[in-house]
Image: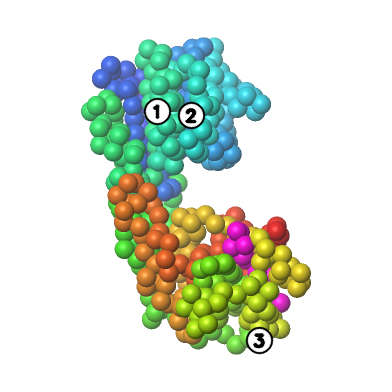
Amino acid sequence: MDPRLFKAQNFMNATRTHPQWLNRADKEAIICDGSVRAGKTFVMSVSYIRWSMANFDGQQFGIAGKTIGSLRRNLIRPLVNVLESQHYQVKDSRSENMLTITHHGISNRYYLFGGKDESSQDLVQGLTAAGFFFDEVALMPQSFVNQATARVSVDGGKYWFNCNPSSPYHWFKLEWLDKLNEHKAIHIHFTMRDNPSLSEATIDRYERMYTGVFYQRYILGQWVLSDGVVYDNFDRQTMVTRPPRPAHITNYVVSCDYGALNPTAFLLWGFSNGVWYCLKEYYFNGRKNKNGHEKSDDQYADDMDHFVGQIKAPIILDPSAVHFAIKLQQRGYHVIPANNDVLNGIRLTQSLMSNGKIMFAPGLPNLFKELASYVWDEKAAEHGEDRVVKQHDHSMDAMRYFCMGVLAPNTNSVSTGVKTLPSY
């Protein structure tokens, strides 16, 4: 048997036959961490149901994700398909966010929770549970997890956790992984090569998607600090090139980071033969202007007119720049509010750079300066937070806005065009 299949199947089969660790008084929790696409969520969710149905009847359980939407999409939907194929009966009460699962006369209830912020702890108060499963626990606040684990008060109850690694100073690493004995917990580490459904070609593709700290975390499954230059994968030799001629460019997009007191940056992007090229930049810093004057929104709109010329292009704009957006719309521009998810935007941008999906023309001095000076916040990292230093980041923000607006996985424009997104 494929050793990867054996590891996953052995884990799930063990939970069906009362595994030793789950029935020992000295083991109260299981933690699975590791790389993306390792199969952690699938293996643990099926195992959690098998364990609970084998050990309890008529009890309540908790299942938590970062949000109810992500939990239903990533965990509940595939879980229900598997359970029903194995002759479990599953009733989904969406108004209560509760599953009632029945099998061979045994029936238990599973309440679904989103643990996205500090206020989420209020959702679990009052629940008496025999077990709690936290999917992507590293994305949840400690207050929510503490409140939820406190709900597990039925004899024989257990805690189940899975996650991708974060900072070694993340609260979950410090309070749970570093205190396995104190919590009577067992730790199992997974990598993509433990997932029997992934081919070598797929694993290779994922390995090429990440660099730097994200490669260490999401491919190697290591708890490491985010430090140093953010885009440490930038290579002038392979990523800077003369762009195609205008006749060969089939789509244009402008991305913009706006600053009332800080610098304002525009980037013009052109699409040709499967690649988006950053063609030219605009950068204005009023504080360093020889006259020392900031520009008005009308003046910036004038500069945008000059920047794009005769090109008709949608503008992906800093979502906070509402007044500037109105000025641009009054001049006939299609303005799209940017997705300002910083960490996911950085991961996506790194991947696109490494895989040759975005390239850069030579004449972008401000963007190149920022690529060399855009760094992780080391003090934040020491407190378990992934944050960038808010300096030298205006072209970086504009670049990230473009990638998230045009090339994020949830858009329909990866190969040829621009998704129609809501305007302001």
Q: What element does badge 3 sit on?
A: helix
On the image, the x and y values in percent for residue 13 come to 39, 28
Where residue 247 is drawn, which disc sits there? 3
Using the image, determine if residue 307 lies above or below residue 146.
Answer: below
Which residue is disc 1 drawn over? 146
Q: Secondary structure at mark 2?
A: helix
Residue 357 visible within the image: no
Q: Is residue 403 above or below residue 195?
A: below
Q: Is residue 28 magenta?
A: no
**Of residues 131 and 279, which is closer to you in this image?**
279
Residue 214 horizontal side relative to residue 401, left or right: left
Majority secondary structure in the magenta region: loop
Which residue: 28% across, 18% down? 24
On the picture, is 335 further left or further right than 29? right
Q: Amino acid at mark 2?
A: Gln
Spatial CA distance of label 3 from label 2 is: 57 Å
The label on residue 121 is: 2
Q: Position of residue 372 (x, y in %)?
A: 37, 73
**Of labels 3 and 2, the one closer to you:** 2
Q: Earlier in the sequence, mark 3 or mark 1?
A: 1
Secondary structure beneath label 1: helix
In which quadrant of the rendered view does residue 19 lie? top left
| Residue for point 65% across, 71% down | 297
First to last magenta residue range = 312-321
Q: What residue appears at the point 75 percent right and 73 percent down from the top-left corner?
A: 331
Given residues 258 and 39, the one toward you in this image is 258
Local crowd at mark 3 within 10 Å, few (<14), some, or many (≥20)? few
Is the Cβ of the residue at disc 1 closer than 8 Å to that at disc 2? yes
Q: Is residue 313 magenta?
A: yes
Q: Is residue 402 above or below residue 302?
A: above
Badge 3 amino acid: Ala
